[in-house]
Image (cartoon, rainbow, N blue to C red):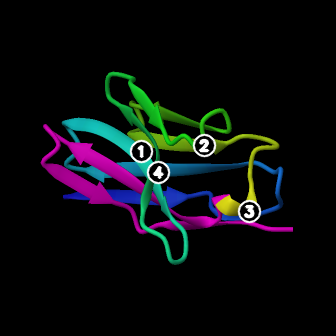
Amino acid sequence: QVQLVESGGGLVQPGGSLTLSCAASGSIFDIYLMGWYRQAPGKQRELVARITSGGTINYADSVKGRFTVSRDNAKNTVYLHMNLNSLKPEDTAVYYCNLVRGLGQFNYWGQGTQVTVSS
């Protein structure tokens, strides 16, 4: 089995910054990619950013230039840096860590961490 433990969410003012972390443990010998999705109230879950084991990165258009995804393979941890002066109220959502193993047939989710951007 795979366990994903997220941390770093919270309340932040517009224009602030925040970093989310997700540490993976368990049967993770064949990770294909790790990344972040988010779900705002009344909306579908959407991709935020993801990074493959080979270093290929994808971002949602809405966060390009504002968020940075990175990964520490030695620690099996993925980070989402919401950069200084970048956060907007529309970034408010529950952020979920995602891990895909093998050829994509194994898909795991974290429990979610709330990010609220408000003054």
Q: Where is 66 relative to 93, above or below?
A: above
Q: Residues within 10 Å of mark 2 (few under 14, many from 20)?
A: some
Give the CA distance from mark 3 to mark 1. Answer: 22 Å
Q: Contact (CB < 8 A) between labels 1 and 4?
A: no
Give the CA distance from mark 1 to mark 4. Answer: 9 Å
Q: Which residue is mark 3?
A: 89
Q: Contact (CB < 8 A) between labels 4 and 2?
A: no
Q: Which residue is mark 2?
A: 63
Q: Residue at 22%, 53% (x, y): give it.
A: 107
Q: Residue at 72%, 40% (x, y): give it.
A: 83
Reading the chain from its start, which is encountered first: label 3 or label 2? 2
Give the CA distance from mark 1 to mark 2. Answer: 13 Å
Q: Contact (CB < 8 A) between labels 3 and 4?
A: no
Q: Secondary structure at mark 4?
A: strand
Q: Is residue 101 magenta?
A: yes
Reading the chain from its start, which is encountered first: label 1 or label 2? 1
Q: Which residue is mark 4?
A: 22
